[in-house]
Image: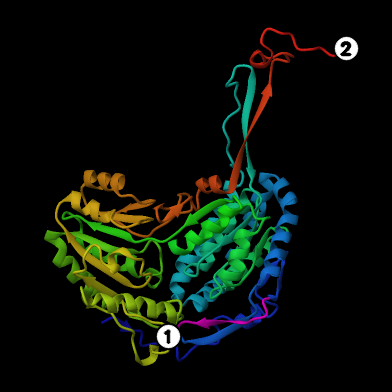
Amino acid sequence: MARESDMHHPGNVTPDRFPAQDHFAEGAQYIAGRLTKGTSGRTHAVVDPATGTTVHTYEPAGRDDVDAAVAAAREALPGWAGATPGERSDALHRFAGVLAERAEEFARAESLQCGKPLKLSRGFDVPGTIDNTAFFAGAARHLAGQSAGEYSGDHTSYVRREPIGVVGSVAPWNYPLQMAAWKILPAIAAGNTIVLKPAEITPFTSLMFARAATDAGIPDGVVNVVTGTGEVAGEHLVGHPDVAMTSFTGSTAVGRRVAEIATATVKRLHLELGGKAPFVVFDDADLQAAANGAVAGALINTGQDCTAATRAYVQRPRYEEFVERTAALMETVRLGDPFAPDTDLGPLVSHAQRDRVAGFVDRARSYARVVTGGEAPGGALRNGAYYRPTLITGAPQDSEVVQAEIFGPVLVVLPFDGDDEGIALANDTPYGLAASAWTRDVYRAGRATREIRAGCVWVNDHIPIISEMPHGGYKASGFGKDMSVYSFEEYTQLKHVMFDNTAVVRKDWHRTIFGDRQPHQAG
C-alpha cells in the first residue's frame, strides 16, 4: 500500500503554511485595483483539504459585484487597448518580476487551498506561471497579421489584429494559479481587459495574481477577479451584455451550460474541457520508463489534471509485467502533509471530490479488479481528503471507469493486441485533450501522433507542457488554445483594411449598377 509520510502529518500544522486571513481581510473580490467584500449576503469557507479545517471565510460575489468588475474592465479598456505593444510588454515583464519576488508566498497559498504538495507548487505551478508571464511579455510585441499587398491589383490590403474587448473568464480549482495565468495573460497581452471568476473553493492565488499585476503597474481595471459561485457570479459574468468573450476551463458538462449562455449573446467562446488521456504502451517500449511515466502521469496533482494518464493500454506480451511494475511503484508513493518535504501525494481538493472518486472505484469492484489502493487512509490522515493511489484492471472498454473523467489518483490498465486496436482504443472515448505513445519505433510513434485524436500527443513521456506550444483539445475536450502565440487567435479579432490606389471616380465594378450609363455628375 502507499505509505504515509512519517515526518510531518496534517495534525502538526506549522504556523507558516499561509496566513490567508491576513491577506484577504479586506475581501475576496478584486475590482479596479483593490480588494473589496462581496455583496451576495452570504459567507463561504475555504477549507484546507489536508486537515478539514477552515482557513478563511469570505463574502462571495453577487450580481452587483460582477457588474462593478465588468464596468471597471470596460472603463480601463480604451487606455489599455490603445497602449503600444511595447508598453504592454514592459508591464508584463515587470509583472513577471513581481511574481518571482513572491514565488514562495504563491506556492504556500496554492498548497494550502488545493492540498497539493509544496514541492509541486514550488517546482511546477509557480515557476510555470512566471514563465508564462515572461513569454507573453515577449509575445505582446508580435501580434502578427498578413503582410500588406495588392491582392486585387487596384487596392492595398492589410490585416489589423485588434482586441475583442472585455473578457469574462471562468477558471477551475485544480490549478488555480496557472489557470488564472492562462486566462489573463494572453487576454491582456493582446490589449483586452478581463474579469476572472476562479473556483470559490480556491480563490487565493487568483486574487494574489491580480494584485501582483497592479503592483507591477498594470492599470486598475485591466485585471479584475470576482469570487463566487458558478450559479450566481459565473452565469451572470458569462451572460453579461458588456462581456465580448468567454473563456472557460472545467468539465464538459458545465462547458455545455457555459456555451448555452454565451451563444445567447453571440460571444466569442473558448472552451478547455474534460479529458481521459490514453497512455499507449507498445511491445517494444522501455517498460520501466513507461511504468515510471504512468505513475507520475496518473498521480500528478493527485490525479486532478485533465491531461493526467487515466487509461493505460498495454500490448498483450508486456501487459502483466507492466501491471506488476506499475502497482509496485504506486505502493511506494508517500501520502502526507502537503507542507512536509517527504510528501509525494497530498489530498484531493475537497472531501466531496474524494467521495466522488471513491464512488467510481467502489462501483468498479463489481466488474473489475482493484489491484492496489482503492481506499482512504486512516490514522493521522483520517481528517483530510486523502485517497490512496489506485490501479484497476479487467474493466470493459465501455465501462464507467474507462469512459468517464474520474479526476483522482486512479489508473485503469487494459491490454490490446495489434497496433490498429491500440490506437482505436485510445480514440474510443468522447474526449481528446491529451495522449501519449510509448515505443522505440519511430514509425509507430509517427503513426500514433498522426492518428490519435488529441490536442497533444507525447512520445515516451506524459504531462510536460511549455509556454511556447499550444494547449487545447479535440472532440468533447473543447476548442481553442491556451498558451503560445496561437492563443492570440482566441483573444483577438481580425480586421481587413482596404485602400483604393487608383483615384478613379468610376470603378470598373460599378457597371453592375450603372451599366453603360454615365453616373450623374454634380455641378
Q: From the top left corner, tell me how far across and down residue 98 is, in percent.
A: 63, 64
Q: Residue furthest right?
A: 523
- Determine if residue 257 is in view: yes
As displayed, is residue 318 above or below residue 142?
Answer: below
The residue range painted magenta reads: 40-50
Query: For residue 431, which quarter of the picture?
Result: bottom left
Left or right: residue 5 versus residue 470 is left
Left or right: residue 1 versus residue 340 is left
Amino acid type shown at disc 2: Gly
Task: Residue 523: give its label.
Answer: 2
Task: Residue 384: give its label.
Answer: 1
The alpha-carbon separation of the residues under discs 2 and 1 comes to 88 Å
Amino acid type shown at disc 1: Gly
- Which sits earlier in the primary sequence, circle 2 or circle 1? 1
Quadrant including the N terminus: bottom left
Q: From the top left corner, tell me how far across and down residue 300 is, in percent.
A: 38, 69
